[in-house]
Image: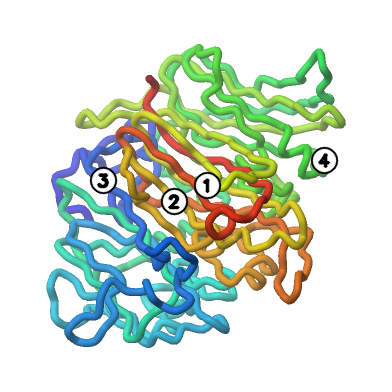
C-alpha cells in the first residue's frame, strides 16, 4: 500500500492513484492504465543462482544458490534494503520436488520470520495467501515452482531457505521517494487473483469513453510489385489505443502469421514505430496457440488481443500488411481508442508504445543473440522468444543465460540460468513436452519434438512480462546465450514490448 501523498487523476488513461513515483506492488496492477508513464524513481533487478565463474553450474550443485549462510545456519537467497517489492520468485528441483525445507521471510530487521512455509506447500496454490494462479507448482508451470504475488518491504527484507536451494531466480524493484508498508500474512490478494483469472478481458481501469472501430477485409498474396495492406485506423488527433483485436477468418499457418505485419505510425511519421509480425506480437512465434496472458493473447478459435495502451499526440495510423507471396486471407479487426493525449503528472513523461522484432536464422556466432538494443529513455514491459533447432541432435540451446544490461553498466543487471528457468519452467524434457500459458509468462506451444538419446529436443515459443516495467534512462540491451557459452546454433526470433520517448 502506498502511504506517500498521492494526486488522483481521472485522465484518459483511466482512474488511478498517481504520484511522481512508480505505483508499486498491488498498486501497479490497480494502475495498469499508467503503463506509458516513465518513472525515474525505480530500479529493476534480477537475482539468480547463475554460475559466477562463467560455467554452467547454475544450480545443479547449489554452488551459487545462496548469498551467504547467516548466524542461524539459514541460507540467505535474497537481502535488500527498501523500499522495494519482490514481484516474482521461482525455484525448480529434481524429480519436480523441492528439498530445501522451509522458506522464510524476515522483514525490517525482525529476528523472527514474519512468514515461513515448506517450499512444496507454498507453491500448491492452496497456501494462504498465495493462492492459485499467483502460485503455481511444477505441473502447472511445467517444471517450475513460481509465485507472482507482490511482496513489498519498507526498510529491509531477507529471504532464507532452511537447506541450500538449487536453481532459483527473483525479480524485484527498488524505489526512491516512495513510502511502502511491508507485507503481512494478512495481505488480501483477492482482486489480483480475480484480475489474473479473467485474462482475455481488458485489465485496465478506464474512465473515458472508448470508441470502437470495426473492419472486415481481405488481403491477397504479395508480389514483387505489390505488398497488400489494409488501413485499420486513421486519426488526426490525440488519444490512446486501449485495445487491438484481430481475428483471422481462416486457419493461418506459422509462415502466414510470421509474414502478416502490424504497422503503427504516430503523429504523421513516415517511419512506423511498430513493424512486427502478428504471430509473435500476440504471443506465439510458432503459429496459432492458446495464449492467455494479462496483456496479449491468441486463440485458435477466436480473436487475438492486445490491451497494452498506446498513446499518441497528434494522430495515428494502424496498418496490416501481407508479406506472404503464397497466400492471403480474410480478417476481422476491432480497435478501441479514447480521445485526448494523457496529461503529464508531476513532470513524469509519457512514453509511446513500441514493439521490436528481431531474428537470426540461424545464429552461429559465439556471441549472445540480441532480442533488443535501444538507446534513449524508456521501459520494457515484456518479451516473446522463439527457438527452433537447426538439427535434431543440436540440442541444449536452452542452457543459454538471459542477460539484460541497463544504462551502460558493464555487468548485466539481469543474469539468468537458462531458457526454461527465465520463463518459469524447468528441466528441458518435461518443459518442452508440457506447454503452459499463465498471466505473466508461458510456453504456449512446442513442436517437432524428438527424443535424442533420452533427452527431448524441439521448437518452442515463450513469453514473459515484467511487472513495474524495466526502466532505463540511457540504454538497454536484452540478450541471451544460445547454449552454454554460445556453443549451439539455432534459429532465434523475438519480439519486445516497450515504451519510449521519441528523440
Badge 4 crowding class, 10 Å Cα cut-off, few under 14, some 14 to 19, many 20 or more, is few
Name the mark on residue 368.
1
Q: How is the image coloured?
A: rainbow
Badge 2 crowding class, 10 Å Cα cut-off, few under 14, some 14 to 19, many 20 or more, is many
Q: Position of residue 26 (x, y in %)?
A: 32, 56
Residue on which disc 4 sits: 250
Mark 2 touches mark 1? (CB < 8 Å): yes
Front tag of 3 and 2: 2
Give above or below for 20 relative to 48.
above
- Tag 2 or tag 3, which sits nearer the N-term? 3
- Tag 2 or tag 4, which sits nearer the N-term? 4
Task: Tell me the quadrant of the picture where the N terminus can be found.
Answer: bottom left
Residue on which disc 3 sits: 42
Badge 3 crowding class, 10 Å Cα cut-off, few under 14, some 14 to 19, many 20 or more, is many
Name the mark on residue 403.
2
Mark 3 touches mark 4? (CB < 8 Å): no
Name the mark on residue 75.
none
- Mark-to-mark CA distance, 4 and 2: 39 Å
Amino acid at each position: 500500500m502506498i502511504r506517500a501523498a498521492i494526486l488522483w487523476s481521472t485522465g484518459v488513461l483511466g482512474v488511478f492513484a498517481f504520484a511522481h513515483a512508480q505505483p508499486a506492488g498491488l498498486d501497479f496492477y490497480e494502475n495498469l492504465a499508467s503503463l506509458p508513464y516513465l518513472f525515474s524513481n525505480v530500479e529493476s533487478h534480477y537475482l539468480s543462482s547463475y554460475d559466477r565463474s562463467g560455467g554452467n553450474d547454475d544450480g545443479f550443485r547449489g554452488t551459487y544458490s545462496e548469498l551467504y549462510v547467516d548466524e542461524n545456519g539459514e541460507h540467505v537467497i535474497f537481502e535488500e534494503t527498501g523500499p522495494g517489492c519482490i514481484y516474482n520468485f521461482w525455484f525448480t528441483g529434481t524429480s519436480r520436488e523441492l528439498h530445501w525445507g522451509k522458506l522464510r521471510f524476515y522483514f525490517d530487521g525482525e529476528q523472527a520470520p514474519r512468514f515461513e512455509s515448506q517450499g512444496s506447500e507454498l507453491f500448491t496454490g492452496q497456501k494462504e495467501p498465495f493462492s492459485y494462479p499467483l502460485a503455481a507448482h511444477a505441473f502447472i508451470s511445467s517444471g517450475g515452482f513460481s509465485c507472482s504475488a507482490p511482496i513489498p518491504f519498507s526498510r529491509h527484507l531477507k529471504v532464507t531457505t532452511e537447506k541450500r536451494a538449487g536453481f532459483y531466480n527473483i525479480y524485484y524493484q527498488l524505489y526512491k521517494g516512495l513510502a511502502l508498508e511491508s507485507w503481512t500474512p494478512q495481505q488480501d490478494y483477492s482482486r489480483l487473483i480475480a484480475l489474473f483469472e479473467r485474462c482475455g478481458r481488458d485489465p485496465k481501469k478506464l474512465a473515458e469513453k472508448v470508441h470502437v472501430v470495426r473492419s472486415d477485409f481481405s488481403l491477397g498474396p504479395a508480389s514483387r510489385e505489390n505488398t497488400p495492406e489494409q488501413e485499420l485506423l486513421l486519426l488526426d488527433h490525440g488519444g490512446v489505443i486501449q485495445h487491438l483485436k484481430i481475428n483471422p477468418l481462416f486457419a493461418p499457418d506459422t509462415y502466414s502469421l510470421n509474414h502478416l505485419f502490424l504497422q503503427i505510425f504516430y503523429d504523421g511519421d513516415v517511419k512506423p514505430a511498430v513493424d512486427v509480425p502478428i504471430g509473435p506480437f500476440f504471443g506465439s512465434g510458432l503459429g496459432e496457440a492458446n495464449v492467455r496472458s494479462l496483456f496479449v493473447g491468441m486463440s485458435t478459435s477466436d480473436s487475438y488481443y492486445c490491451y497494452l495502451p498506446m498513446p499518441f499526440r497528434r494522430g495515428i495510423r494502424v496498418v496490416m500488411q501481407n508479406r506472404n507471396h503464397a497466400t492471403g486471407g480474410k480478417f476481422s479487426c476491432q480497435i478501441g481508442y479514447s480521445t485526448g493525449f494523457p496529461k503529464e503528472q508531476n513532470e513524469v513523461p509519457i512514453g509511446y508504445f513500441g514493439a521490436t522484432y528481431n531474428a537470426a536464422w540461424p545464429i552461429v556466432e559465439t556471441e549472445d543473440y540480441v532480442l533488443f538494443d535501444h538507446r534513449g529513455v524508456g521501459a520494457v514491459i515484456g518479451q516473446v522468444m522463439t527457438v527452433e533447432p537447426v538439427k535434431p541432435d543440436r540440442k541444449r540451446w536452452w542452457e543459454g543465460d538471459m542477460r539484460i544490461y541497463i544504462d551502460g553498466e558493464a555487468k548485466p543487471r539481469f543474469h539468468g540460468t537458462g531458457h526454461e528457468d527465465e520463463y518459469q519452467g524447468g528441466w528441458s524434457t518435461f518443459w518442452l513436452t508440457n506447454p503452459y500459458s499463465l498471466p505473466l509468462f508461458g510456453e504456449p506451444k512446442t513442436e517437432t519434438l524428438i527424443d535424442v538419446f533420452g533427452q527431448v529436443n524441439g521448437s518452442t515459443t515463450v513469453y514473459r512480462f515484467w511487472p513495474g516495467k524495466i526502466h532505463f534512462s540511457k540504454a538497454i540491451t536484452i540478450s541471451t546465450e544460445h547454449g552454454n557459452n554460445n556453443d549451439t546454433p539455432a534459429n532465434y526470433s523475438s519480439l519486445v514490448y516497450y515504451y519510449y520517448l521519441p528523440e
